[in-house]
Image (cartoon, rainbow, N blue to C red):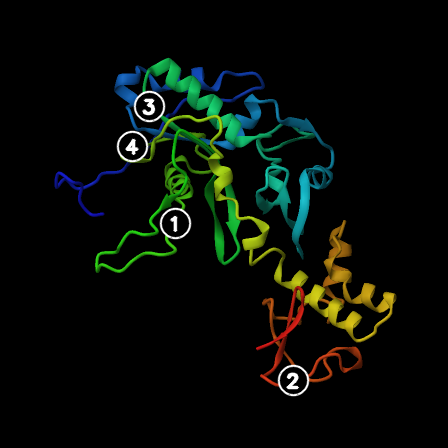
Amino acid sequence: MPFTADGARPRLEVFVLPGIGEIRAGDDLAAIILAVAGPAASRLADGDILAVTSKIVSKAEGRQVAATDREQAITDETVRVVATRAHPGGVTRIVENRQGLVMAAAGVDASNVAEGTVLLLPADPDASARALCAALRAATGLELGVLITDTVGRPWRDGQTDIAIGAAGVAVLDDLRGTTDAHGRRLDVTVAAVADEIAGAADLIKGKTSGNPVAVIRGLGHLVAAVDAGDRGARRLLRDSANDMFRIGSAEAYAEGYAAGVAAAGGGASAVASASGATREPTTAEDAAELRERAPSTLPKGQDAVTRETPAGDLPGGARSAGANGPEVATHSGSASL
């Protein structure tokens, strides 16, 4: 809302804590953060939220591992492949990782680490956030919140932004359902992802190359809460499979639907395998390029949508034709009339 109960205009302040320096395995992050923050009374206050870049958490927890092949490290951290795309620079894999996050390369990072090593995400970002938050609160006597942040792309928009992958002592969602808007209309679906919004705001000042991995957000004290070991933290932000309308990539969905159509038309095992070939995971850039050329088992050139109009006879054996209610479309589970 534009004004607080006492008529004052709300104020949001975001600032970095410079001087963190290089973090090594076993370092006490809470002690390091407090050392650069100075006296708690002057640099931190009740209701402050600290946004901490996941990279320094991973380094402190010893998540830097030997890996001569980053691609193998990505495979090892992958639970489910969402989409794979070949490009001039190689192959990009969007996957669900062990933490349940869907992101490029499973969050495996090869930047700012020793040659021949990669950095994995914290094994349990929420547990990391709880431990750090508890240590900071114990040392300062202040009610603080902690977010562990990482950078991700977004399925509908270009560019990357930071999100919260771990949280403690701070609400990650602001459920506005049941309240009314400025015109008295009831809100039925609005649940604000405030932890992600805070992470994005913090990244504006932390930056990617400035060497400032910790930011303080002040002015959102109403979101700071007790540290509860049973709290799901940032895992509450993960959408479950039953409600995930974008479970796989668009080309993968088309290929899967096409293969289902081939099978429905009585195609043999080899035909189905050929039609669904684009859904298998390429292991090299050349392999990915080959799969991309195997039209129509992937999307037609220039098309990037899960569904498309399908004229009669598009599938082998005329498996699909215009339905009684309009053209049919290919989906990841087969076909359906529009």
Task: Determine which residue is flagged by label 2.
Answer: 322
The residue shown at (48%, 37%) is 234
Q: Name the image quarter holding residue 224.
A: top left
The residues bearing labels 4 and 3 have C-alpha atoms spaced at a distance of: 9 Å
Helix, strand or loop status at disc 4: helix
- Mark found first going from the N terminus, 4 or 2: 4
What SS does tag 2 mark?
loop
Work out whether residue 67 or residue 131 is closer to the camera in this orientation and state it. 131
Q: Of the numbered discs in the image, which one, if any, rests on residue 146? A: none
User: Mark 3 falls on what kind of element?
Assistant: loop
Sooner in the amino-acid sequence: mark 1 or mark 4: 1
Task: Indicate the position of residue 153 as horizontal and vertical percent values.
Answer: 52, 49
Classed neighbour count for the residue bearing mark 2: other residues with Cα under 10 Å, few (<14), some (14–19), many (≥20): some
> Which residue was labeled with disc 1?
191
Query: In the image, is 7 to the left or to the right of 120?
Result: left
Instruction: Tell me where residue 86 appears, x and y as whole percent.
Output: 68, 56
Tell me which amino acid carries mark 2.
Ala
Q: Are marks 4 and 3 in contact (CB under 8 Å)?
A: yes
Disc 4 designates what residue? 221
Inspect the image, locate mark 1, and give the three-letter code of the amino acid beneath it.
Val
Task: Check if mark 1's residue and mark 2's residue have beta carbons within 8 Å.
Answer: no
Do callouts 4 and 2 mark residues in contact (Cβ within 8 Å)?
no
Q: CA distance from mark 1 to mark 4?
A: 19 Å
Of circles 1 and 3, which is in front? Answer: 1
